[in-house]
Image: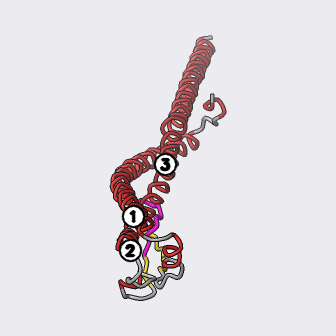
Amino acid sequence: MAATHVNPTRMELTRLKKKLVTALRGHKLLKDKRDELMRQFLILVRENKSLREKVEAGIRSADQNFVLARAAMPDEEVNVALMAPKQEVYLEMDERNVMSVEVPVFHYKTRTPDADDIYSYGFAFTSGDLDAAVKSLADLLPDMLKLAEVEKSCQLMSMEIEKTRRRVNALEHVMIPELQENIRYITMKLDENERSTQIRLMKVKDMMLEEAHHYKKKQNEAFAG
């Protein structure tokens, strides 16, 4: 056991008691952090589920419109219409701190502020279904970016939760019991040493009293003679 390798001194006992107090405080803080991380994680998971359903529904709708557009237009015309996009999107990323986890925050801006620049073709020779497909994808972009942000946040927070859980378990099942066992061991050893010292002192005292008694007895006999 680890306790057998501990130096049973009062200085070591004081050091281990301070270490135990710190470990208990750290254990409580880590448990609170783990619980709050779990709460935030569950909020993100629910948001992720809602966003994913919305994005998948939007993509299905856009796919249906593209299918209708390809049915109404030759493939060559669809390809030519989408060959040279007029609009560009620039993505920027910031970070925000959630319980010591740096999660991403995505922002985007377009090259031009004109909403009609999402259409890279004229409307005269294209199907309305193609317009609907392009518009639905453009409208879906903010939700897709938010979904990516939330999914990455969930991934980072799940890693932090697992790391925090391992630390809590290490403190709860290894470090704190070991410190408590070592403290009990040193306390027991110190008590044993104290009892042994008291017994030795009592024996020395008895020997001294007995020696003094014999000395006085010899003195009295000398005076009587």
Q: Quadrant of residue 148?
A: bottom left
Residue annotated with mark 3: 164
- Quadrant in which the N terminus appears: top right
Q: Quadrant of residue 178?
A: top right
Q: Is residue 28 magenta?
A: no
Residue pictured at 56% horizontal, 34% vertical: 182
Whole-angstrom CA distance, mark 1 to mark 2, is 9 Å
Residue pictured at 47% horizontal, 85% vertical: 86
| Residue range highlighted in magenta | 97-107
Q: Characterize the local packing of mark 1: few (<14), some (14-19) or many (20 or more) Cα atoms within 10 angstroms.
A: some
Question: Can residue 34 be seen here?
Answer: yes
Q: Position of residue 66 (x, y in %)?
A: 42, 65
Question: Can residue 146 be seen here?
Answer: no
**Position of 170 relative to 131 (above/below):** above
Q: Secondary structure at mark 2?
A: loop
The kind of secondary structure the magenta stretch mainly shows is strand
Q: Position of residue 136 (x, y in %)?
A: 36, 69
Q: Nearer the viewer, residue 193 or 125?
A: 125
Residue annotated with mark 1: 68
Chain-order first, disc 2 or disc 3: 2
Please tell me the numbered disc located at residue 127.
Answer: 2
Determine whether, in the image, residue 215 is placed left or right of residue 43. Answer: right
Q: Nearer the viewer, residue 74 or 154?
A: 74
Q: Position of residue 145 (x, y in %)?
A: 43, 67
